[in-house]
Amino acid sequence: MTVSDLPIKNTEAAIIGLSMMQRIRFLEEKITELRKQQIIQGSVHLCIGQESIYAGALQALRQGDQVFSTYRGHGWAMACGVPPEAILAELLGRQTGVNQGRGGSAYFSAADWGFYGENSIVGAGAPIACGAALTNKLTRNGAVALTAFGDGAMNQGAIHEAMNFAAYLDLPVIFVCENNVYSELTPIAEMTRDTNLFKRAQAYGIPGMRIDGNDLEAVRDCVAEQAKAAREGKGPVLIEMMTQRLVGHYYGDMQSYRPRGELAEAKKNEPILRLREKLLGMDVSATQLDDCEADARNTIEAAAQKALDAPLADTKTILEHLYA
């Protein structure tokens, strides 16, 4: 029996997590629709298939903790509690966006919800998270910084420098590698000799582990345990969360690099389907789960309409809030 086969310990938390995953999924699908219509402009990176990482991690964190994501950050923002209308409005260049339409998909942040933003420089969020963690340690506020990045970013110097810095100072940082097995368009297996990326933690003398990123409870329990350790002054950790994205690296990616049948197989293991089937097997009614899904879909549809109805960002203010 694998961990994923074990019964769910907290059914209510699992249903809440499923609802969040569905909201993230429908948000990304709505973003895809609006990008296809060219109402949303610019680069868009979607997280469809990786939703349990965000929903599970945020069930384990608490108010005051900080999240620093990669450029694939819509799911992190939603899980942090950022209203979907504010996310969509930002991508649509509306005044009601979290950054008043200035950040778009690649650069938006929402500090009021503990989401300190995306970063289009691969791996750059990790050293920034270390800065937040250093503040947490010096002020003894009990907060933990979580920084997320992809498997490809594990080969970036900034990630290694951040881990070394965090390890040396015992900073309360959780390094999360969202390993979706592709570094942009290249399999991680073609870029490194050992694909067990969590083992690199050993070089810095910090804990490293690999978990099933498509298992909500596995993510929640692991992050909860490691966040507790970080709050107790035990320093940073590297968690490699295995998953697969069900869409291209970016909107418009034809995915011709994927072997035939790989995507179909990945869809059998995707987190929303898995959790729904597990809940049904525990006698949660299909009607309850259908109502949960309908509510999530209606929430995103209503948020999209409000965002579309909002006024466009004022171009006269384009130079405001710029720092160099």
Image (cartoon, rainbow, N blue to C red):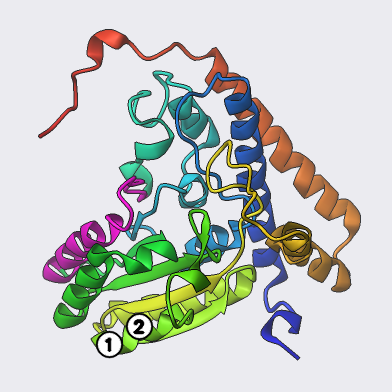
- Magenta residues span 114-139
Q: Secondary structure at mark 1?
A: helix
Q: Secondary structure at mark 2?
A: helix
Mark 2 surroundings within 10 Å by alpha-carbon count, few (fewer than 14), some (14 through 19), many (20 or more): some
Q: Residue at x 40, y 30 (%)?
A: 104
- Kindly indicate whether the residue at mark 2 contacts the one at mark 1 (C-beta within 8 angstroms): yes
The foreground one among 39 and 307 is 39
Residue at the disc numbered 2: 200
Q: Residue at x 24, y 17 (%)?
A: 318
In the image, is residue 138 part of the stretch drawn in magenta? yes
Q: How far from the left and from the top, in percent, is residue 305?
A: 62, 20
The foreground one among 201 and 17 is 201
Mark 1 surroundings within 10 Å by alpha-carbon count, few (fewer than 14), some (14 through 19), many (20 or more): few
Q: CA distance from mark 1 to mark 2?
A: 6 Å
Q: How far from the left and from the top, in percent, is residue 256?
A: 65, 49
Residue at the disc numbered 1: 203
The foreground one among 154 and 236 is 154
Q: Residue at x 68, y 49 (%)?
A: 22
Can residue 62 be seen in the rendering of this structure? no
Q: On the rendered image, what quadrant is the N terminus found in?
A: bottom right
Q: How far from the left and from the top, in percent, is residue 93?
A: 42, 21
Q: Relative to 96, does residue 194 appear above or below in the rendering?
A: below
Q: On the rendered image, what quadrant is the C terminus found in?
A: top left
Q: In the shown orientation, is residue 206 left or right of residue 26?
A: left
What's the residue type where badge 1 is placed? Ala
Indicate the quadrant where residue 302 lies: top right
Farthest residue toward the top? 316
Q: Residue at x 60, y 62 (%)?
A: 52
The foreground one among 104 and 112 is 104
What's the residue type where badge 2 is placed? Arg
